[in-house]
Amino acid sequence: MPPTDARTDTGAGPTPQLGRGAEDTLDLRLPEELLALFREDELTFGSPQPDVSRVGDLLDAPADWGPVTTSVGSVHLVPVRIERDLPLISRWMNDPAVAAFWELAGPESITAAHLRTQLDGDGRSIPCLGVLSGTPMSYFEIYRADLDPLARHYPARPHDTGIHLLIGNVADRGRGVGSTLLRAVADLVLDNRPRCARVIAEPHLRNTPSVSAFLSAGFRFSAEVDLPDKRAALMVRDRALRRLL
């Protein structure tokens, strides 16, 4: 579950890593009966004329959310394609400031396995490049916090949506870019997932720059949470408070 540079806002990292004795985000397999209930929910509580091609999409198609204008430029979430994006993401994962929290340093095969776990899964977690004014400069994971092992450690609500972020370019760290991206993407989630009342994050408690970035992005500190691989700060951006924070 990783995060932000120990000195700057590198990111808010992933869920516990496979093979490290912790529960991975996608280790918990959903039975088909439960997935059917979520698909039924899409039909019952979605728009009056739902797009049937998106029925069963657990995250409401982040690929379709489009760019959003911010004070640092236009931000666009672009779903990862391993054949195109692996060298770049792996290079970021080998940055010592990133590796300290994401723990995915090493050959490209390590990052590839992490990405494939999500891309070959049931859609509960979607890896994306954060493209700023046409340049890929960050990595996001948008995930269903209520369907994640994280939900065992806090009072989850249906459709809680989580964010992990790392900023790849050193020049973009420590100057508020991370906070701007976090606010923009959290608002994209709330704008495009009408049933989601809260956006969740769980940076390492000792990663104070990451916690600070979330606070600056309109998240509130909710609690300290003991997770299998870390003590985390549970950060929450509430739909009801988004215009106030």
Image: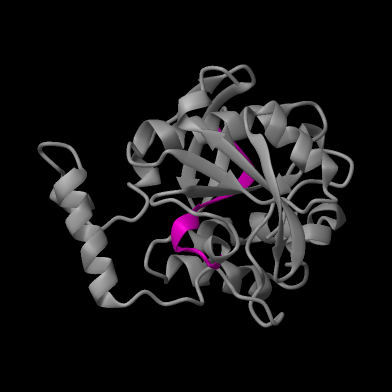
- Look at 71% across and 46% down and name the residue there: 11
- Look at 57% across and 62% down and name the residue there: 150
Quadrant assignment, res 152:
bottom right
Q: Is residue 207 above or below residue 101?
A: above
Q: Exactly how many numbered labels are in the figure?
A: 0
Q: Can you give x and y, in whole percent of width and height, for residue 72 in the image? A: 64, 21
Q: Is residue 54 visible?
A: yes
Q: Can you give x and y, in whole percent of width and height, for residue 50 in the image? A: 14, 43
Quadrant assignment, res 153:
bottom right
Left or right placement of residue 131 versus residue 167 in this view: left
Left or right placement of residue 5 versus residue 64 in this view: right
Per the rendered image, the range of residues in magenta is 134-149
- Look at 37% across and 51% down and name the residue there: 59
Of the pair 3 and 99, the residue shown nearer to us: 3
Of the pair 152 and 72, the residue shown nearer to us: 152
Q: Residue furthest left?
A: 49
- What quarter of the picture does the N terminus occupy? bottom right
Q: Can you give x and y, in whole percent of width and height, for residue 87 in the image? A: 65, 60
Q: Main secondary structure of the magenta part?
A: strand
Of the pair 107 and 148, the residue shown nearer to us: 148
- Look at 39% across and 62% down and name the residue there: 123
Q: Is residue 178 visible?
A: no
**Residue 146 lies within the magenta run:** yes
